[in-house]
Image: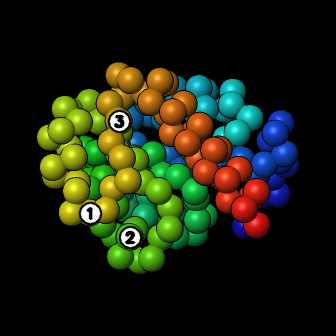
Amino acid sequence: MVPAVAETDSGAMPIRILLVDDSQEFLSSAVDFLSRDSRVQIVGQAANGLQGCELAMELEPDLVLMDFSMPVMDGSKATHEMKAQGSRSKIVLCTIGTAEEVRRKAEHAGVDGVIQKSDFAQDILSIIESFSVNRNDRETSR
Protein backbone atom coordinates (compact mmCIF):
# COMPACT_ATOMS: atom_id res chain seq x y z
CA MET A 1 0.00 0.00 0.00
CA VAL A 2 1.34 3.41 -1.02
CA PRO A 3 0.86 6.22 1.51
CA ALA A 4 -1.30 9.20 0.61
CA VAL A 5 0.66 12.11 -0.75
CA ALA A 6 0.07 15.81 -0.41
CA GLU A 7 0.21 18.04 -3.44
CA THR A 8 3.37 20.01 -4.18
CA ASP A 9 3.72 23.73 -3.54
CA SER A 10 2.31 24.37 -7.02
CA GLY A 11 -0.76 22.21 -6.33
CA ALA A 12 0.35 19.33 -8.56
CA MET A 13 0.92 15.78 -7.39
CA PRO A 14 4.63 15.00 -6.82
CA ILE A 15 6.63 12.91 -9.25
CA ARG A 16 6.84 9.43 -7.74
CA ILE A 17 10.40 8.11 -8.05
CA LEU A 18 11.86 4.63 -7.54
CA LEU A 19 15.65 4.49 -7.08
CA VAL A 20 17.51 1.33 -8.13
CA ASP A 21 21.25 1.13 -7.48
CA ASP A 22 23.63 -1.31 -5.82
CA SER A 23 25.61 1.55 -4.27
CA GLN A 24 24.16 2.47 -0.89
CA GLU A 25 26.25 5.64 -1.00
CA PHE A 26 24.65 6.74 -4.27
CA LEU A 27 21.15 5.84 -3.03
CA SER A 28 21.68 7.86 0.16
CA SER A 29 23.01 10.85 -1.77
CA ALA A 30 20.17 10.71 -4.29
CA VAL A 31 17.53 10.46 -1.56
CA ASP A 32 19.12 13.35 0.33
CA PHE A 33 19.23 15.51 -2.80
CA LEU A 34 15.78 14.61 -4.16
CA SER A 35 13.96 14.84 -0.84
CA ARG A 36 14.68 18.59 -0.80
CA ASP A 37 12.50 19.07 -3.91
CA SER A 38 8.78 19.41 -3.17
CA ARG A 39 7.98 18.16 -6.68
CA VAL A 40 9.36 14.72 -5.80
CA GLN A 41 8.33 11.77 -3.65
CA ILE A 42 10.73 8.83 -3.26
CA VAL A 43 8.42 5.79 -3.22
CA GLY A 44 11.05 3.06 -2.98
CA GLN A 45 14.62 1.86 -3.26
CA ALA A 46 16.12 -1.34 -4.59
CA ALA A 47 19.67 -2.72 -4.64
CA ASN A 48 19.50 -4.58 -7.98
CA GLY A 49 17.48 -4.78 -11.17
CA LEU A 50 15.39 -7.77 -10.10
CA GLN A 51 14.24 -6.00 -6.92
CA GLY A 52 13.69 -2.88 -9.02
CA CYS A 53 11.38 -4.76 -11.39
CA GLU A 54 9.36 -6.15 -8.50
CA LEU A 55 9.01 -2.74 -6.84
CA ALA A 56 8.21 -0.98 -10.12
CA MET A 57 5.27 -3.31 -10.74
CA GLU A 58 4.07 -2.96 -7.14
CA LEU A 59 4.53 0.79 -6.71
CA GLU A 60 3.93 2.03 -10.28
CA PRO A 61 6.29 5.03 -10.00
CA ASP A 62 6.29 7.84 -12.54
CA LEU A 63 10.05 7.63 -12.89
CA VAL A 64 12.63 4.93 -12.22
CA LEU A 65 16.22 6.09 -11.80
CA MET A 66 18.31 2.98 -12.29
CA ASP A 67 21.99 2.15 -12.28
CA PHE A 68 23.22 0.58 -15.48
CA SER A 69 25.68 -1.85 -13.93
CA MET A 70 24.34 -3.95 -11.02
CA PRO A 71 24.51 -7.52 -9.76
CA VAL A 72 21.65 -10.00 -10.26
CA MET A 73 20.11 -8.00 -13.16
CA ASP A 74 21.63 -4.94 -14.84
CA GLY A 75 19.70 -1.80 -15.67
CA SER A 76 19.26 -2.62 -19.34
CA LYS A 77 17.75 -6.05 -18.64
CA ALA A 78 15.61 -4.66 -15.84
CA THR A 79 14.29 -1.94 -18.16
CA HIS A 80 13.45 -4.52 -20.81
CA GLU A 81 11.64 -6.62 -18.19
CA MET A 82 9.68 -3.66 -16.80
CA LYS A 83 8.55 -2.60 -20.26
CA ALA A 84 7.64 -6.21 -21.17
CA GLN A 85 5.47 -6.38 -18.03
CA GLY A 86 3.61 -3.27 -19.14
CA SER A 87 5.21 -0.66 -16.90
CA ARG A 88 4.35 2.89 -17.93
CA SER A 89 7.15 4.34 -15.78
CA LYS A 90 9.77 6.46 -17.48
CA ILE A 91 13.12 4.80 -16.95
CA VAL A 92 16.38 6.73 -16.84
CA LEU A 93 19.65 4.85 -16.50
CA CYS A 94 22.37 6.41 -14.36
CA THR A 95 25.94 5.46 -15.16
CA ILE A 96 29.57 6.19 -14.47
CA GLY A 97 30.39 4.83 -17.93
CA THR A 98 30.13 6.92 -21.05
CA ALA A 99 26.54 7.84 -21.83
CA GLU A 100 26.98 6.87 -25.49
CA GLU A 101 28.22 3.39 -24.59
CA VAL A 102 25.28 2.85 -22.25
CA ARG A 103 22.81 4.31 -24.77
CA ARG A 104 23.93 1.82 -27.42
CA LYS A 105 23.60 -1.12 -25.04
CA ALA A 106 20.26 0.01 -23.57
CA GLU A 107 18.52 1.30 -26.70
CA HIS A 108 16.72 -1.97 -27.44
CA ALA A 109 15.39 -2.17 -23.87
CA GLY A 110 13.23 0.95 -24.15
CA VAL A 111 15.20 3.26 -21.88
CA ASP A 112 13.79 6.78 -21.79
CA GLY A 113 17.10 8.44 -20.98
CA VAL A 114 20.66 8.09 -19.76
CA ILE A 115 22.47 10.41 -17.38
CA GLN A 116 25.98 10.44 -15.99
CA LYS A 117 26.18 10.02 -12.23
CA SER A 118 28.76 12.81 -12.17
CA ASP A 119 26.09 15.16 -13.61
CA PHE A 120 23.21 13.72 -11.56
CA ALA A 121 22.18 16.90 -9.73
CA GLN A 122 22.06 19.01 -12.87
CA ASP A 123 20.49 16.40 -15.16
CA ILE A 124 17.87 15.15 -12.71
CA LEU A 125 16.63 18.69 -12.15
CA SER A 126 16.06 19.01 -15.92
CA ILE A 127 14.14 15.72 -15.92
CA ILE A 128 12.00 16.79 -12.96
CA GLU A 129 11.29 20.13 -14.63
CA SER A 130 10.29 18.31 -17.83
CA PHE A 131 7.91 16.07 -15.86
CA SER A 132 6.43 19.10 -14.11
CA VAL A 133 5.88 20.99 -17.37
CA ASN A 134 4.36 17.95 -19.12
CA ARG A 135 1.99 17.34 -16.19
CA ASN A 136 0.86 20.95 -16.14
CA ASP A 137 0.25 20.84 -19.89
CA ARG A 138 -1.87 17.67 -19.53
CA GLU A 139 -3.83 19.10 -16.61
CA THR A 140 -4.64 22.38 -18.41
CA SER A 141 -5.70 20.58 -21.59
CA ARG A 142 -8.43 18.64 -19.75
Q: Which residue is mark 2?
A: 83
Amino acid tagged 2: Lys
* Element carrying mark 2: helix
> Which tag, 2 or 3, sits closer to the chain's start?
2
The N terminus appears in which quarter of the rendering?
bottom right
Q: Is residue 72 left or right of residue 29?
A: left
**For the residue carrying disc 1, how many other residues have a C-alpha within 10 Å: few (<14), some (14-19), or many (20+)?**
some
> Which tag, 3 or 1, sits closer to the chain's start?
1
Q: CB under 8 Å between callouts 2 and 3?
A: no
- Disc ID at residue 109: 1
Q: CB under 8 Å between callouts 2 and 1?
A: yes
Gap between marks 3 and 1 measured at Cα: 16 Å
**Against 61, is 47 above or below?**
above
- Disc ID at residue 115: 3
Q: Is residue 50 left or right of residue 9?
A: left
From the viewer's side, name the closer residue of 31 and 63. Answer: 63
> Which tag, 2 or 1, sits closer to the chain's start?
2
User: In the rendering, at what x and y percent does residue 32 appear?
Assistant: 60, 27
**For the residue carrying disc 3, how many other residues have a C-alpha within 10 Å: few (<14), some (14-19), or many (20+)?**
many
Q: Name the residue rendered at 50%, 61% in the picture.
A: 89
* Element carrying mark 1: helix
Gap between marks 2 and 1 measured at Cα: 8 Å
Q: Name the residue rendered at 49%, 24% in the picture.
A: 121
User: In the rendering, at what x and y percent does residue 120 appear?
Assistant: 43, 28
Amino acid tagged 3: Ile
From the viewer's side, name the closer residue of 133 and 37. Answer: 133
* Element carrying mark 3: strand
Amino acid tagged 1: Ala
